[in-house]
Amino acid sequence: MDLRLKDKVAIVTGSSKGIGAGIAKAFAKAGAKVVVNYAKNKESATQVVNSITVNGGTAIAIQADISKFTDIQKLFKATNDAFGQLDILVNNAGVFKIELLDVITEESFHLQVNTHLMAPILSIQQAVKMFSANGGSIINISSTVSQNPLPGFMVYSAAKAGIDNVTRVLAKELGPKKIRINVIAPGITETEGNYEMGILGGDTEKQMVPLTPLGRLGQPDDIAKVAVFLASDEAGWITGERITVSGGLL
């Protein structure tokens, strides 16, 4: 039995579906108590919690739109009220729009940047306050497009490149507090959101899969396995790293 995260408490933002749900389930399987955060989809978040608890794990769902600072504060207060501690934060929540330059608006820019860059920074501020003297582990979720952007991905790619550098800077700032921070960059992954956006089931999938050396789409569990490792004591000497989990796609 994998109990690498036994007695740990973890917040996984945006974990009602996709990669976040995969990470939440894997953390619980490894012994962590998990906060499943969602913005709107309460039903999906409840399903994730039920899938964890039916297998003997511990999880609760907390609604919070992490693009809003007041909701971020609410998320961390509710976590503290429920579990009295925090050991792991995964900044996974995201929104995504494929937009060429001529259709980008102020609204779409701020939606993506606030969610992918501002929210993780403000969430990390709250997490640092809750971590004990033993430190903690922070995992940011980036993307391969932070280093290899595609047409239509300009704002998203810029925000993800930003979170890569936030991770590197904060590894130096937070190391003296025994807080580790790393970033995972997934490749093309089979999630509900990618189907909804048309990235999967269309031309983009047909282009990307043949470029992936391992020749398949990623699965949420592929990312989750790396997240469990980074959150565990096995990764106790690892901080400031960007780990690409993409089947070889760069």
Image (cartoon, rainbow, N blue to C red):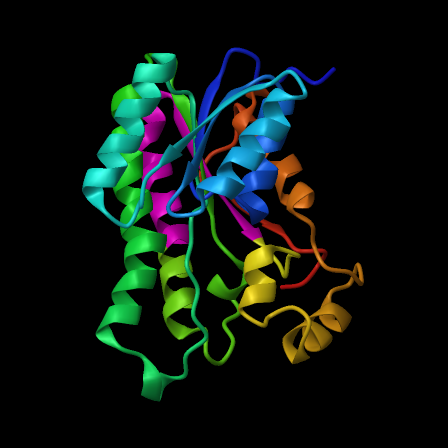
Image coordinates of residue 159 in percent, x first then y, are 36, 61
Residue lying furthest front: 43
Give, as a single range, the part of the protein colored magenta. 163-185
Horizontal arrangement in the rendering, residue 248 relative to residue 113 (left or right): right
On the image, which quarter does residue 123 sit in? top left
On the image, which quarter does residue 178 sit in? top left
54 and 75: which is toward the camera: 54
Look at the image and tell me whether residue 176 can be seen: yes
209 and 111: which is toward the camera: 111
Q: What residue lies at 43% left-to-right and 70% top-to-bottom?
A: 97
How would you classify the magenta stretch by its main secondary structure? helix
> Quick one: quadrant of the N terminus?
top right
On the image, which quarter does residue 249 sit in? bottom right
Residue lying furthest left: 70
Q: What residue lies at 30% left-to-right and 62% top-to-bottom?
A: 111
Look at the image and tell me whether residue 229 can be seen: no
> Quick one: quadrant of the C terminus?
bottom right
